[in-house]
Structure formats: C-alpha cells, structure tokens
Amino acid sequence: MPQATILVLGSINTDLVVRGTRLPAPGETIVGGTFFRAAGGKGANQAVAAARAGAVSVSLIAAVGDDDLGRESLAGLHTEGIGCDLVKRIQGEPSGVALIMVDQAGQNCISVASGANLHLTPADIDAIDDSRFEQSAVLLACLEAPVHTVIRGLQRARQMGLTTILNPAPADPQIASPDVLKYVDIITPNETEAALLTGQAVQEPAQAIAAGKRLTQLGCRHAIVTMGARGCVVVNDQVRQVDALPVQAVDTTAAGDAFNGTLALALAEGKDLMTSVGWAVSAAAISVTRPGAQPSLPRRDEIDKAFRRPDT
Ligand code: RIB
C-alpha cells in the first residue's frame, strides 16, 4: 500500500455549539439547549479525518490569528499528528469562529466569522517549497479559504502531478468555470452546493446526477454529489449511486468533512475511486452518530468495520 501523504488547504475554526430541540426562526429565541465548544473548520476537520483514517502524513495549509483560540487549535492539530508548519499566524486578526445550532434530528445551521482564514493568499501558496507537493499524493481543498488562494493551490498541485479534490463548501459560483475546474480531478458538492454551482434544482438523485454531469462538462474528471442520508452519486463517464449506511443521526456537523478527508486518504493509499467512495460514505455515517465536528471523526478501525463496497 503506498504511504498516504496529503496536503489539505482550508480553514481552522473554533466551534461554539448549542444543541436544542429545534432550530430557531429569524427573530426567535429558544431556551433549553446545551452548549459545548469543539475544534472545527472545514480544512482542519478534513485534515483530522484523513489522519484518523490512516494517513501517514497530513499537512494543513491555513491561517490562524495570534490569539488563544488559534494556539488551542494548533495544539489540537499537533496532537492529531497534523503538520502545521504551513499554517500562517496573522497578527491583529482573530482566529476563525463558527456559531453552530443543532436540532434534535441532527440538522444544523452554521454562521462563520472567518477572521484570519481570509488572510491566506495566493502568494502563500507560491511560497510553499516544490518538495511539499512532490512528497504528496493528494491535495484536498475547501472554500473556507479565499477562492483565489484555493485556485492557486489547485493549479500548483495539478502541475506537480497530485490528485486534486475540491470540496466546494461553502459554494462559490466563481469556481464553476472551465478555467478552474480544469485543475480539479474530483469535485464533491452537497445538494445545496451543487444547486448553487449549476443553477439547477438539486433535491432528487436524478437532479444530482444532472448537476454532476454539468460539473464534469465544465472540466472536472469526476463529480460526487453527496446527499446526506440518501448517499451520493458519482458521475464520470458512468453514473453510479451509492447508498448511505443506515444510522441514527445525532449531529450532521462535519459529515461532509469526514467524507472528504477519508476520500483523500483512500485515494492517496491507491484505492480505486469506488472503493474510496465506500470508505468516505462509511466515515460520514459514523460521524453523524456523534456530536461535534472533530470529536465525531472516526478512526480507521471503525471505518474498516463499517465499510461496505459499493455496487459498481
Ligand atoms: O463542516 C463543518 C464545519 O463548518 C464546522 O466545524 C465549522 O467550523 C464550519 O467551518
């Protein structure tokens, strides 16, 4: 098995979470919830997901403020074995914070104050030594880092021969263009993101397949549209639907991050695409059975146990 070495380009946040019976409507106050704080940020979550799933080396390209939250986030990432030497410290900017509300069914809504995350620049990507790309098999990026920085990362990774995965979360229609998607091997939107990127409704699997086809026409090699409890569709020169594992959802926060980090790990290990998707679906299913972002991410033995090879 090849040694899985992965670069993750994205965000680092601290999540402030209230779990309540339901999500409030605009202008409404609901009392009776419980509070916890957890490590989060889509980039950091994806890096941790890959590391727990078995990556030999994961380095995170991101930015934090020079504050207590940033220092705590970095300490947590070090404990997970994530390489943080490519994480920039920004003086005078707060580290990223996400306010998250979760209801009884595990659904959430999230508001992010990006802070230092917005200060990662294309020049920071240019400053990374070629050797870091040469030593890596996969670059996984999300859009909680500035879009032009992400595009530069994808471009450099592609030039250096890495497999590139773009998790377009949160969706930015700027990336739905051949000028960007030509650098992307695999794009992984959820239904909402796929709809925003394609301008098409995406509620049913058939619509997810149509959106996936549109994204591949725009230049990426594979589109994987994730649909929560309904699994995902994989669109390339074929179309395949993969069921989710049946679980009782407690908190869906970071299910997408579990999916993407594990997908990156499996591909970096040399697994074929559909086996890798099976791994990713299994990791996402486990993550929704537990509260929090990083606290919910599974370890390799758990994924191994839950793994079911998708029908192909
Ligand atoms: O994907 C979940 C993540 O989104 C949370 O950890 C939060 O920080 C936001 O970035």
Image: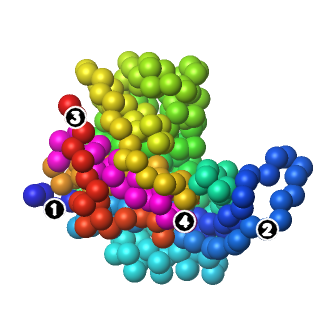
- CA distance for labels 1 and 2: 48 Å
Residue 180 is drawn in which quadrant? top left
Q: Amino acid at mark 4?
A: Pro
- CA distance for labels 1 and 4: 31 Å
Q: Which mark is residue 291?
A: 4
Q: Which mark is residue 3?
A: 1
Mark 2 falls on what kind of element? loop
Q: Is disc 1 in contact with disc 4, using a CB cutoff of under 8 Å?
A: no
Which label sits in the foreground, 1 or 4? Answer: 4
Residue 79 is drawn in which quadrant? bottom left
Decide whether residue 272 is among the magenta residues. Answer: yes
Q: Which residue is mark 3?
A: 311
Sequence order check, earlier mark of 1 and 2 = 1
Q: Is disc 1 in contact with disc 2, using a CB cutoff of under 8 Å?
A: no
- CA distance for labels 3 and 2: 44 Å
User: How many neighbours does mark 4 have within 10 angstroms: few (below 14), some (14-19), or many (20 or more)?
Assistant: many
Q: Nearer the viewer, residue 267 or 30?
A: 30
- CA distance for labels 4 and 2: 17 Å
User: How many neighbours does mark 2 have within 10 angstroms: few (below 14), some (14-19), or many (20 or more)?
Assistant: few
